[in-house]
Image (tube, rainbow, N blue to C red):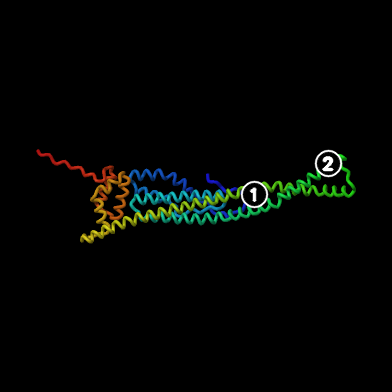
Amino acid sequence: MRPMPFMLFSAVALVAQAPANVDLAQRFNQELPGITQMLKELKAQEALTKVQALIPAERPVFDASSPKAIGQSLDNAQGLMSLYRLYANVAAEAGQWEKATEIHEKRAQAARATLADLDKAQAPIVAQWKKASEDSAAYIAKNTPRQQELQLFLQTLKDDVAAVNSKQKKLEAKEMDELKARIAQAPANEQELAQINAALPVHKQNLANAPKVTKTLGDNRKEVEGMIKSADEAVTKAKKTVADQNQEITDFNTQQTIKKVKVVGKKNWVDAVMRAPENITKLGTPQAQVAFLNRLLVLDPGNKLAQKALDNLLAGKDAFAKPAKKGGAKKK
């Protein structure tokens, strides 16, 4: 449960927006096991279709109607980030590295849009608490001495009245008039003191809560800044992966050209990779091998060597399993 800003004794009204009608964090948690299982079963294309359908057509509206709604919107944003990350990972396993890069870029854009929404939503709360802190500090500074003054006035009056009533003190006519005036003033002073006694704890609580609210608002912003940082790092990594592979292919094709070998797009490089089975088998698990073969087939659609190795893996065989020999016809 994320902490929510403490409420003031007089809350400011925030502009309500239409609440998000879907819980993307829950959607991610529910769908992740199934997508993961599909990848283990080497069904990357099916998994890609499945996860693509989980991404909302538009980023959910950021609900700023209350501090609690803001927290729920942040949870929903985290869910969207997780879905984008899953989508990009599945696209990469399907060999579509460029698509994965685009997905990470959309994720980064969504994170930045979320930060803009959050700043707009929290601005009234920041202003509210700033004013409340200033007002409360001023009230305490002014009324704490007044509280003591009123308490002293009423206690002294009580003591003087008691002394006169018990005949411990005898007053002159002028002094009696002054006492009567003080007695007449007492109800107003009592009322003022009661108001101060009721208000001071509230103002003191506002001052105590203000740093906690500031921390909560700051933590909210750090959370979204973390989303942006993670997405940006994913974009950089994805772009580098594509660029490194493209550079490797370019360098290889340059050497082929020097050797006067006819270069056909990226086919020469893919063929060279497939002629060394260890390039595939060193990847270990069938899932990792299938992911790389999917990439090779994106680079060179229809490559027979890559397709055969992929078909073998999908059939539960080793990537480079040799076909079984057909039995010869028996002689009579």
Q: Amino acid at mark 1?
A: Phe
The residue to which callout 2 is attached is: 162
Please tell me whether mark 2 sits on a helix, a strand or a loop: helix
Residue 319 picture location, percent across and down: 26, 45
Q: Residue furthest right?
A: 173
Residue 208 picture location, percent across and down: 62, 47
Numbered mark located on residue 9 in the image? 1
Q: Residues within 10 Å of mark 1 (few under 14, many from 20)?
A: few
Please tell me whether mark 1 sits on a helix, a strand or a loop: loop
Q: Residues within 10 Å of mark 2 (few under 14, many from 20)?
A: few
Q: Is residue 249 above or below residue 32?
A: below
Q: In the shown orientation, is residue 138 left or right of residue 228?
A: right
Give yes or no for contact between labels 2 and 1 (Cβ–Cβ under 8 Å). Answer: no
Q: In the shown orientation, is residue 243 left or right of residue 57?
A: left
Q: For the C terminus, which image quadrant?
A: top left
User: Residue 245's image quarter?
Assistant: bottom left
3D distance between C-alphas at marks 2 and 1 = 40 Å
Residue 289 picture location, percent across and down: 30, 47
- Residue located 28% across and 55% down the image: 301
